[in-house]
Each structure stands twice: as C-alpha cells, then as structure tokens.
Image (cartoon, rainbow, N blue to C red):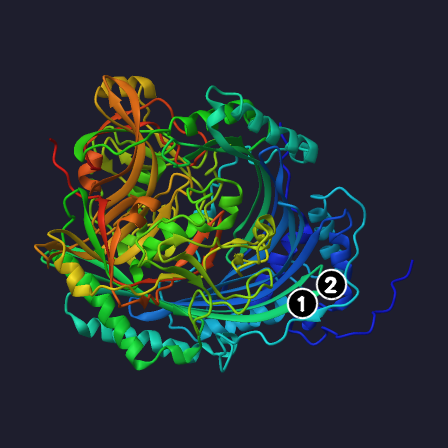
Amino acid sequence: MTTRETVGEEFKEIARAAVTAARVAGAQGVAARVGKVRDVGVQWRDGQIEQVTESTTRGLALSLYVDGCFASVSTSDLRPEAIGPFIADAVAMTRTLSQDPFRVLPDPALYLNRPDLDLEFADPEYNNLSATRRRDLARTIEDAARSVTAADKILSVTTSVSDSRSEMFRVTSNGFEGERIDTSFWLSGSVTVKDSDGRRPEEGDFSGGRFVRDLGDPKRVGESSAQRALARLGSSKAASNAMTMVLDNRAAGRLVSALLSPLAASSIQQRRSFLEGRAGQEVGSPLLHIEDDPLIPKGFGSRHFDGEGISARKLPIFDRGVLRNYYIDTYYGRKLSMPPTTGGTSNLSWALGSRSQAALIADAKEGVFVTGFLGGNSNGTTGDYSFGVQGFMIRQGASAEPVAEMNISGNQLELWKRLAGVGNDPYPYSPLRTPTLVFENVSFAGI
Amino acid sequence: MTTPPPPPGPSIGTTYFTAFGVDERLIREALSSALSRGGEYADLFFQHRIAHNFVLEDGSVNRAFKGTELGVGVRVVKGDQTGYAFTEDLSLESIRQAARTAATIADGSQGEAPERFHITTGLPSRYATERHWDNVRPEEKLPLLTGLNDRTFSMDPAIRKVNITFGDETSAILIADSSGRVVEDIQPMTLLYLSCVAEKNGEREQNTYGVAARKDMSFYSKDRLDLIVQEAVDRTMILFDAVQPPAGEMPIVLGAGASGILLHEAIGHGMEADFNRKGTSIYADKIGKKVAHPFINIVDEGTEEGARGSINIDDEGNAVGRTNLVEDGVLTTYLHDSISAKHYGVKPTGNGRRESYQYPPLPRMRSTYMLPGPHKKEEIIASVKKGLFCTNFTNGQVQIGAGDFTFYVKNGYLIEDGKLTRPIKDVNIIGNGPKVLERIDMVADDLTIDQGGWTCGKDGQSVPVSQGIPTVRVSSITVGGRSERS
C-alpha cells in the first residue's frame, strides 16, 4: 500500500474561502482553483553555467456564475486585503455581461466514480536533486556531446537540467473537490554545428519523467544531441514531388495535434471543424486507431479528473479509421445537445504496429524520412494544411542525405486515409505518445 | 546590527508601487541580498499587470476573463552568467529569499548595494492615455463588440458565425538596479480580433482580422471599426474562390504591411545578440558584410506613437531608439540587451525585453521593418511572369543557426504574366534567411507598418511586436502547395 502526498489544508482553505466570498458577493455557482508551481533549472553552455533559475509561482483562479452570466478570473496577488476586493469586482464585472443559459457547472453525477488508481504523479524523492548534482548532469551532457565522432564541427553546446513540482486543489459550489501533486524532471541538450556553407544547424534531444529516477541517461542525451545536429550537415532541398513520408515518432505530434483540435466541441459548434458531422464515418485508414487514455501511470497527460472535474475514463477517438467521439465539455455539449465526454485530450493510446522505425524506412524503399517540422499551419475548418519539414531522403530502404527547406501540403481528410504504417515505438516524452507513422503519396515542395 | 537610516537624497517613495510597500529601503536591502555573493550587477523588476478579455460568440458578449499579476523578479549577473528568481509576495523577507537564490550564480564576497537611487525622468511618452484601461468600465466596451457583430452579419448573407475578442491591459513596471537607477513606466495595450465563418454552396471558410495598439478607447474610431468588419469579411469570402497554389520554387511579391513577418523571421531573430555572442546564429561574425542589395535598409525601433511594439524604456531600464540592422545592404548592428552589449563592448540598444517578472530579459525585437525603396508596387507585380502575391499571414518560425525560416500565407493571389489572377490560401513558404535577403531585388516606396496583434515567442517568453515592409519581390523561394507524383 502506498500513501500519497496531499495538498496542505492551509492552501486548500484559500480556495474554499474564495468560493464562500464569491457566493456572499452574489455568485450562485463558483469553481475555485489554487495552484502552486516550483520550477528549478540550470542551463549550461560551453563549459560553464549560463543561467540558474528557481522560483515558486502561485495563483487563484475562479469561474463565476452570476445571475445567468459567466466570467473567469485569476490573480497572483494573494494578499488577504487584495483577494476580497478582487472577488467583489469580478462578480460585478460578470453581471455586466449577457446571460447565457448554456453556462452551468457540470452535472455533479459526472464527478462520481473517480478512478482510485495511483497514477504515480509525484516523486516522493522530489527534493533529492541537489544543485551540485544538477550541475554535474548538465556538464555530463555537454561532455558526451563533445565525445562523438566529428565533434570538431561543434560550435556550441547548451544543456539544461530542470525540474518542477506543482500542487493544485479545486473546489466547486456544487460538490466537487479534487487535488493533485505532480513532479517532473528533464534533461536536454542542444548542439550547434558549423556547415561548410556558413549555415549553423542546431539540433537536440532530451529525456525525462515524473520521477527523478526516470531522468534518463545524460550521456545518451548528449551523444544523441550531437549526432542529430551533425546529421544535418550538408542538407539541401529535393525536387518537388509526391512521395512516401515516414514521420519520426518525436515529430509526429505536430500533425496529430492538427487532427485533434477540430474534434473540440467548441470547433464543432462554431462550425470551424472539417470533422463536424463525421462521427461514425471513416476518416482515416484502418491503421488510425486511437484511444484517449487518462489512466496511464506516470503519463504526462494522465489525470483522475479533467479541468471541469469530470471523472476520467478512457474514450475511443478513432476506431480502425472510424471517428467515434469528440472532445465535449459541459458548455458546448449543452449548445450542441450532446452529452459531455471530456473537454480536452489526456494521453493518446495507439494501436501499435509490430515494426520498428528502421523496418518501416526499409519497407518504404524510397521517400522522405521527416524528423522535424518548421512553421506551417493547418486550417481546422477545411482540413487544408501546409507545413515546413526537414529530414532525410530514403533511398533503397535506408535513411540517406539530409533534406531541409521543404514543405508538405494537402488536406487532412486525404492524408489520414493514406496512413499506411504505424510503428511499435510510442514517443514517451509527450502525452500524444505518437509512434512512427508512414503516409503514402504526400505532396512535398522543394526545388 | 541595526539598519542605518536612509541617506538623504531623492526619495522614490512616490511611485506606483508605494501602495504595495515598495520603498527605497526595501529596494536597497533586496539588492544587497542579490549582491551577497558578489555578482557584478543586479536588478529588480516589479510588475503589476491587469488584463481583461471580453468575448462575443453566438450574438452576445457572454464571457469575460480578468487576470491580475503582481510580482518581482530578481536578476544577478556575472559576466555572461545569470541567476534569476522571482516572487509574488512583495514582503522584504520573500524578496530577499529570491535575491539570495539568484545570487548563487556568483561565488564571491558581499557587494555593495547603492546608497542612493536616482529616478530616471524625462522618459519619452509614446503611449499616453486619457484613462488607464483598468478604469474603463465593461459597459463602455461591450457595445463595441455587439455593434461589430451586427455589422458583420449585415455584410453578407453567407456569414454564419462571428467571434470577437476584445482585450485590454495595463502593466506598471519598476526597474531598480545596482547602479542606483530606478525607472518606472505604465504600459497600456489593447487588441481586437474579429473572426467569421461563412458557408456557400456547402463549403465553409473562416478567417480573422485583428488590430492592436498601446492606446485607449479612442483607438476604436468609426473608420477603424469599419475597416475591421470589411477586412474580416473580405478575407473570409475570397477564400471560396481560392486554391492552394502549385508547389516549388518561384518568385513571390510580398504586399506592404504584414509581410514584415519575413523580416522578423529571416533576419530579426538571427540579429538578436545573444545568439551571436554564443556563435549560434547564421549572422554571427557577419557585421560589416554585404548581405543585400544596396537599396535595402532594415531597422528595429520602439518609438512609434502607440504602436504595439513601442516602449518608452526596455525591461532593463535602457533607452529605446532606432537600431539599424541593415544599412544600404550592409549588416550593421545586432539587437542588444545589457549582457550582450557588455560582451561586445557597445551601448545597449534598448532591446532587453521580457514577458513578465517571471522571466529574465533577453534581446528581443520591437517594431521591425524595411525602409522604402526605389520601385513601384505596380512595376513589381508586372515584373513577375509566374509567381505569388502574398498579403495576409498567420504565423512564422525560424531556425536561428541554419537560417531556414517559414511563414504561413492565409491570403494572396497567383501572378500570371504580370497580373493578379486566382486567389490563393493556406500555403507555407520556406526559405533561408541570408539567401532570401540577397534575393529581395525590388523594393517599393509604400512602407506600411501593420497594425495586427503580433506576438513573438522566444525561450518560452511572449512579447508584443510590430512589423512592416513596403511591397517587395523575392526572386525565388520554395512555396508549399500541391505537387503530383513525377
């Protein structure tokens, strides 16, 4: 049996007192959230510390339901003499707005059945990372970066070691109370190298986790940062063509986010979603199979309840290419006459393939292995997208010369039907947990 | 040990922050803690910021947001090294604790805090307002939104949804440093975005137009409100006729105004001196070199009355003027904060900026634009046989070291045989900074500073900026778009 750390009563009292104060000021419904975040970081560059930062931020946020009107407010000024007038002003401001019959606190029934799992958010060893250890880790990353083959081309190495601990407590006037404490620890390396044409490509890598013991290997981070940067040397742009795209698991989140944001009920209700009215329809290839899973231990998107207090549960999003669910919060759900699911993504759980990234590149034979995006955008209303990309040409089933300064463009409804491969390698450092993805017949713009 | 009485001299007890208990004694003791391990320089950045947002959706202003931030950041500098901490509790004890944390960047003996402080007076007044936004009641703002909503719907029967966000902000700052300098400023901001969705023949399109300024309610004149409605509707309706253009390298003409995004990405970031002192910018070691045609001049300044990117002082308390990035085609000056200025042995350029008290300052842009050139807009468009004319943009990004940058074109036209033909939409353009600068081979005389609410992100910090440009031609750049399998 494990005992979980809890948020201090004194801190909770700030939120409870705010609910009372808002009700006294005339609010019929109130949600209050207090939060406190401590961030510590060391940045190291070329043999010495560049920057040390350490701070604790705190704040109070309120959602106010006053005579049918709604506003939300936040403050970092928690002086008792400031909070009272702040809440009174906020309630008065809310009253000046138009009434909105759709705006209510969630149905308390949705607060029930909160999962009672230990999702391992908070490291009990949190305070054990000393300033000296941080410095040593930062130095080790640089030393490893400078130890790789061709390190003489390295111009600069910046590394960082950071950690964060946050506490939050949320309470509503209709019976919700919830809290969480979470921690995370990160290592990163960033390496700039000198190219023969004057370009100075920069690449990097990182690792981390919820617990200090999940920080990862600083040597691996350093070596990988340098190797990634050196691999960019001599990059050029290829001819414009429609080609197979193998998309690195680390980079794939950008494209997946562009698919998820039109699933928000606000986008549907405001008619800004190319996925409106497509529930039950096939919008991707059968390989597009994703479940929203808030209950993965140590997951960066894990939670027991969502931002509104709705108890967490798994939610199928795409089932063998068929759209199953939208992300529906209370407000837009009422506007759409659809029951709420949850207002935002947690972790994604993919139906993984059996092939490694190298095997997928080998299978592709010819194409582009895209390792990063640069700018670009996706039009959520129409699904048209255009993104800058860089990566490597795939020749005879292997990653070959580096390419940069290229774009991919098209429409997402076409793109996801061309999903032809899913790797066995979910990216561990993002809640989207994307595996390597393979798309056929993607429009690349270059020369 | 007892604290000595405050020495005679100018008192700073009359400032905005007096109400929060900030006085000379507190500043002196905080700086003393900041220098407790012998940092070369320390500063305090106090900030009180109040922001409002009002949102109109489905015909009524049915939500509002208000945020208050109060805090102080303590920075200690030793050479190129920085220690930084902040607190939201302005008690002396709490500030001293933050200061001691920041002090750990140094490892020497106690330094001296200044005996006397001097308020910098005679600051420019680039955004004087009749009333601070915090004193403007919601009842005065809300009719603006409902009026815009009604007029937008009346413009075209195809309009289905209108979404309007009105924001205002008042930020008071006080900077006190270990040289005894104290500087204060109150910085207003307002922005308004109008976005609409239209439906025609079963198709849907959406677009947005926005304006921003450091001004008060008088910014929202009838002419400006008319312009907002007209632009938002025009930019949306034209999308029904627009296509994604063909892919590949081609000449592009950038319309005057918002196309300044090209300068922001292609050269502005690369000229920020922190990247250059670290050797990680493609522009490192290029000062004094020819980088563009001789008729090209690019500046970054923060002086235009009421502009979003304007500031009376930067966030380190330094004066803000005009910095020449490129003069007659030659790379001239980097954008400096005080750390990089010291590193290079030059004067700070007033580019030290930060998002809030939670962050240390960095070299950042203010308002970046190109000065007028010798050509005419019509002659530039007429010179292109097959290419694009780009007018509206949503976002851009750059790799500082490799120099590759992108910007996303939301509206524009194909140019065929010197004439604007089919509208285009949703296309990303990618190029390499120095190469594209060389390829700007025509510059018109129609410089326009865009009034949009541009926000620049760097190291996780967002700051408001402006940008502008005359109509220019880039002889060749890679346009995203549709390509067929060859």
Say which quarter of the image contains residue B263: bottom left
Q: Is residue B9 above or below residue A275?
A: below
Q: Is residue A153 above or below residue A355?
A: below
Q: Quadrant of the N terminus of chain B?
A: bottom right
Is A120 situated left or right of A372 in this image? Answer: right
Q: Quadrant of the C terminus of chain B?
A: top left
Look at mark 2 in the image and give the residue it sits on. B27
Residue depicted at 31% across the width and 55% down the height: B394
Is B117 situated left or right of A21 in this image? Answer: right
SS type, badge 1? strand
The chain containing the residue under callout 1 comes to B
Packing grade of label 1 (10 A; few <14, some 14-19, many >=20) is many
On residue B182, the disc is: 1
Asked if labels 2 and 1 share a chain, the reply is yes
Q: Are marks 2 and 1 in contact (CB under 8 Å)?
A: yes
Residue depicted at 62% across the width and 27% down the height: A1
Image position, residue A426 (x, y; %): 39, 27
Q: Nearer the viewer, residue B241 or B292?
A: B292
On residue B151, the disc is: none
The chain containing the residue under callout 2 comes to B
Residue depicted at 20% across the width and 44% down the height: A278
For badge 2, the amino acid type reads Ile
Is A383 situated left or right of A424 in this image? Answer: left
Q: Nearer the viewer, residue B431 or B214?
A: B431
**Cα–Cα span, label 2 and label 1:** 10 Å
Is B486 situated left or right of B275 in this image? Answer: left
Visible residue check, residue A325: no
SS type, badge 2? helix
